Structures are given as C-alpha cells and as structure tokens.
C-alpha cells in the first residue's frame, strides 16, 4: 500500500516541462544559481503570459497522457523491462553461486528482492547490507557465511565499477562526460571533483577489502582497532570491531575458493550491472532518437557516484535533479524529462518497493514455519 501511495503521489506531483516553441506560461529564472532547471521547484519559475514561456506546469500523469505511444515506444519499453529482468536474474544467480548452492532458486529470489527492498527504504550511504545479513541468516545460513556473502557482493559491485570506468574513458573519452551545467549543483562542488573523490574512495575501498580478506585479515583488524583508539574516533570503535570480525570471518569462509567460483560470481555481477545501465538507454529510445547511446550509457557511470553518496532513501530527490542535469543535452530540448525520470525510477526504485512489500509478509511466514520445524 505504501509503495503504491508513493508512486501515485509522484504521478500526481506537478512539475515544469519544456513547452514546444515557446507555448508555455512559465519562464525558468534559476534563483538558486545552480544552472540546472529543478523541474519540481516552483521558486525556479515565474509565470508569464500564455504563449510567452518555455515551460508549462503539468503533473507527471498529464505528461504521460500527452505521449504518443507507438509500437516503436512499446518495443523499447519492453527492452527496458527485459534489461531489468536480466539485472535481477544476474543477482539471483550470483546469490546461488556465493551460497555454494545452499540457497535454492526461490530462496535466492527472496533474498535478492528483499535486499533491494531494504536498499530502496534506506539512504544510499547506508544501504541494506545489515538487513541483508539478517535475511540470509533467516534462510538458514550461518552468520559467517551470511557475512561473507554480503561483503563479497559489495566488493564485486564496487570492483565492476572500478573496471568499467577506465573502459568507458577509453571508448568515450573524458571531454563530454561531465556536463558543465552540473558544476556546483551538488554540495557546491564541480561534478568532476565529486566523481574523482567518489571514484578514488571506491578504488581505495576495493583494494583495502580485497587485501584484508585474501591476505592479512587479522592484521587489518589490528590496524583498524589501533586507529580507532584515538580519542576523536573512539565513539565508532564498537562498530569497527564488528567490521574487523566480519573481515576475519569472511576470509575464513572464502580463502581457497576455486577460480571458477570467482569467475561465475563476477561474471554475474558484470551481467547485472551492464543490464542495469541499459534501462535509461531503452527508455530514452522509446521517446527520442538518441544520437549517442554510448555517451548516454557512460554518463550513467558518472551519475552513479552522485546517487551512491545521496543521503536520502533510494536517492529520492537527488536522482531526479541528477537525471535532468546529466541527460538534458543528450535528449531533445522539448519535453518529457520529468516523465522519463519517473519511468526510470519506476524500474529502479518503485519496482522493488512494490515487489518487496508483496514478498516480505509471505517470506516472514514461510521462514517462521521453517524455523519452528527445525
């Protein structure tokens, strides 16, 4: 119910859409001086005489109603749906691999959907990892195995990003990846600076976790505890102790796994993330002639860093502004950016709220019965 309400609320939310040939009744004035039209902020627009403005105020439902749906549009939306399905199939298969087959396909589906549901319900900087350990543990896996699965899943997600970015730079270059209109739009920093800070942090995190899991887990824990003995860091020491214990446990679970195990798990990760980033391309192609699909795809890798550090649940709010800023110059100036952003959020956010809210009660009942019998 709550997921449906959130979706219905956003469908009824009024936004400012570009009007054809100055037929609107509002003008963008950029009062916050971030060079990005925040289509949901009334303070960014002044009302003018009808036919003298470049924007008009419409609900997302009204905008969707004005779209001329064709077989061409339906085909590309179907491709977006298939990309979402492939993304989830990759995650489900990875869960099977990382659990060494202890989770069957149905259990892997439940864990994946509920993990996505938890991630959608929490800020991106927090994520659903803590809840994921509970979910996996409730499916009957030991705490050590659950901890290992969660940490390695996060490691592989970040590793895909670390590998994908240089490939994108090789084929696309860097000149067009950072839209100038986004400078100072997020936290007062140029988008290029935010990206490099975020990417550098991800690379450091991957190297640190990889080294600690596969080479010196106890030494890593020892260093962490020494650092967090400092007076201004001592308040976080209990959490760091748990992190150190998790690293040691994960190392014991995973060291010695064959190369085939890692190849299958990382292959599933790449398949899932590659499918995930195709969704926007397919949605855009349903409404526009996209001139450069590769650049559109590459921009998403840059945007992902912004969404990763967003403090809002599911990156809500930040995602819509980022979408407009990153893709405005790649899509025709006229129309539907807000509606396309909502469709994108439907596939990447609302879908998991809806599926998770349906899956959760049934999963709780089934796992409770299973635990009662054991």
Image (cartoon, grey):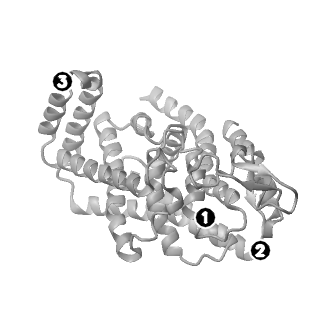
Dot 1 falls on a residue whose secondary structure is loop
Dot 2 falls on a residue whose secondary structure is loop
For residue 150, which quarter of the picture? top left
Q: Residue 10 at x, y = what percent? A: 71, 45
125 lies left or right of 359: left
Residue lying at 46% horizontally and 51% vertically, measured from the top left: 306
Depicted 5 relative to depicted 185: above or below: above
Single out the mark in the foreground, 2 or 1.
1
340 lies left or right of 119: right
Where is mark 1, residue-wise?
328
Foreground residue among 327 and 126: 327
Residue lying at 80% horizontally and 66% vertically, measured from the top left: 22
Q: Residue 244 at x, y = what percent? A: 22, 34
Q: Residue 310 at x, y = what percent? A: 48, 43
Q: CA distance from mark 2 to mark 1?
A: 23 Å
- Can residue 265 be seen here? The reply is no
Where is mark 2, residue-wise?
70
């Amino acid at each position: 119910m709550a997921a449906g309400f959130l979706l219905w609320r956003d469908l009824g939310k009024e936004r400012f859409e570009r009007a054809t040939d100055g037929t609107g009744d509002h003008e963008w004035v950029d009062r916050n001086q971030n060079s990005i039209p925040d289509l949901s902020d009334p303070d960014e627009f002044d009302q003018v005489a009808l036919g003298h403005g470049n924007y008009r105020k419409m609900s997302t439902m009204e905008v969707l109603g004005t779209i001329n749906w064709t077989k061409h549009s339906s085909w590309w939306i179907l491709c977006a749906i298939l990309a979402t399905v492939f993304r989830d199939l990759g995650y489900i298969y990875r869960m099977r691999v990382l659990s060494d087959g202890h989770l069957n396909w149905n259990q892997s589906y439940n864990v994946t959907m509920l993990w996505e549901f938890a991630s959608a319900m929490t800020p991106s900087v927090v994520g659903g990892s803590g809840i994921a350990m509970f979910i996996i543990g409730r499916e009957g896996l030991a705490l050590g195995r659950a901890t290992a699965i969660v940490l390695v899943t996060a490691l592989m997600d970040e590793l895909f990003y670390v590998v994908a970015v240089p490939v994108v730079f090789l084929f696309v270059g860097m000149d067009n990846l950072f839209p100038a209109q986004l400078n100072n739009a997020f936290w007062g920093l140029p988008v290029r600076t935010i990206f490099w800070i975020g990417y550098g942090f991800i690379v450091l995190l991957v190297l640190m976790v990889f080294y600690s899991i596969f080479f010196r887990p106890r030494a890593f824990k020892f260093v962490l505890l020494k650092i967090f003995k400092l007076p201004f860091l001592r308040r976080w020491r209990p959490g760091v102790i748990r992190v150190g214990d998790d690293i040691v446990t994960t190392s014991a679970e995973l060291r010695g796994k064959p190369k085939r195990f890692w190849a299958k798990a990382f292959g599933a990760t790449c398949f899932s993330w590659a499918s995930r980033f195709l969704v926007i391309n397919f949605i855009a192609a349903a409404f526009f002639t996209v001139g450069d699909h590769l650049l559109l795809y590459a921009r998403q890798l840059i945007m992902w860093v912004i969404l990763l550090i967003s403090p809002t649940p599911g990156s809500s709010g930040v995602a819509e502004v980022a979408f407009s800023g990153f893709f405005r110059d790649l899509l025709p100036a006229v129309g539907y950016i807000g509606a396309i952003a909502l469709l994108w959020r439907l596939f990447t956010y609302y879908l998991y709220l809806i599926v998770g809210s349906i899956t959760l009660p049934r999963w709780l009942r089934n796992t409770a019965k299973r635990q009662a019998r054991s």
